[in-house]
Amino acid sequence: MTGRLKFPRGLYGVTPDWTDADKLESAVRQAIAGGMVALQLRHKTATPEFRRDLALRLLPICRHAGVPLLINDDWRLALEIKADGVHLGQHDEDPDIVRANVGAGMMIGVSCYASLPRAQSLLRCAPVYIAFGAMFASGTKPLAPPAPLTVLGEALRLTTSMSEPRPSVAAIGGINLNNAGTVIDAGASSLAVVGGLFQATDITSTARAFSELFN
């Protein structure tokens, strides 16, 4: 198995599908100021050119702050711009093929939904995190099937026999400041948040409040 990198514990911001690049850059800067520890560039409606422009714009900001930037779906873009990693879902390219192409030095995060067997099978590609959700009703993915909170503890137990650094257990879907503590208590070491972070009136204060839940 390839050596595994370590994914930071804490708030994992996932970008909304905004068309205003200046607004998104400002929001990311605010989230970093509040303690966001990782960022995923996810933009399902963007053209490849706009997505690439966003990635090139956000990468130096994240790098300066020591915040890993992962690209959703597009491992070729991640490799081209030397991003820190890529996030892969069920309908994306096979994680084993992606790992063979990007090498051991790039982070791979994987969506496992509510499936422990899927998580178990994907451990072979040395993911930095295994993500579960939707934990709650999600405005970003309203049709996403629910995942029970108990799956987080089960996933944690799945990784306990592994050598360090173990893959993190990430949670996504409808997470906000009212329910985030429950998700962490259930076993999540990373909270992937879209609307609960980037739709906040004060993004920096919201990011700080999320981050303080991990203390």
Image: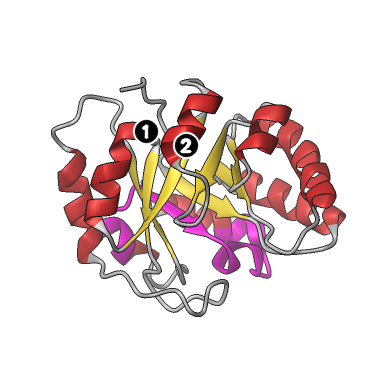
- The three-letter amino acid code for the residue at tag 1 is Cys
Of badges 1 and 2, the one in the foreground is 1
Label 2 Cα neighbours within 10 Å, binned few <14 / some 14-19 / many ≥20 = many
The image shows residue 191, relative to residue 79, as above or below, that is below
Q: Which secondary structure, mark 1?
A: helix
Residue 17: x %, y % from top left: 71, 64
Mark number, residue 38: none
Of the pair 2 and 40, the residue shown nearer to us: 2
Q: Is residue 109 magenta?
A: no
Q: Is residue 186 magenta?
A: yes
| Magenta residues, start to end | 182-206
Of the pair 203 and 167, the residue shown nearer to us: 167
Mark number, residue 125: 1
Residue drawn at point x = 71 percent, y = 29 percent: 80
The image shows residue 77, relative to residue 139, as above or below, that is above
- The three-letter amino acid code for the residue at tag 2 is Ile
Q: State if disc 2 and disc 1 touch (CB < 8 Å).
A: yes
Give the residue pinned by disc 2: 108
Q: How many marks?
A: 2
Residue drawn at point x = 78 percent, y = 43 percent: 52
Residue drawn at point x = 50 percent, y = 47 percent: 88
Residue drawn at point x = 47 percent, y = 50 percent: 211
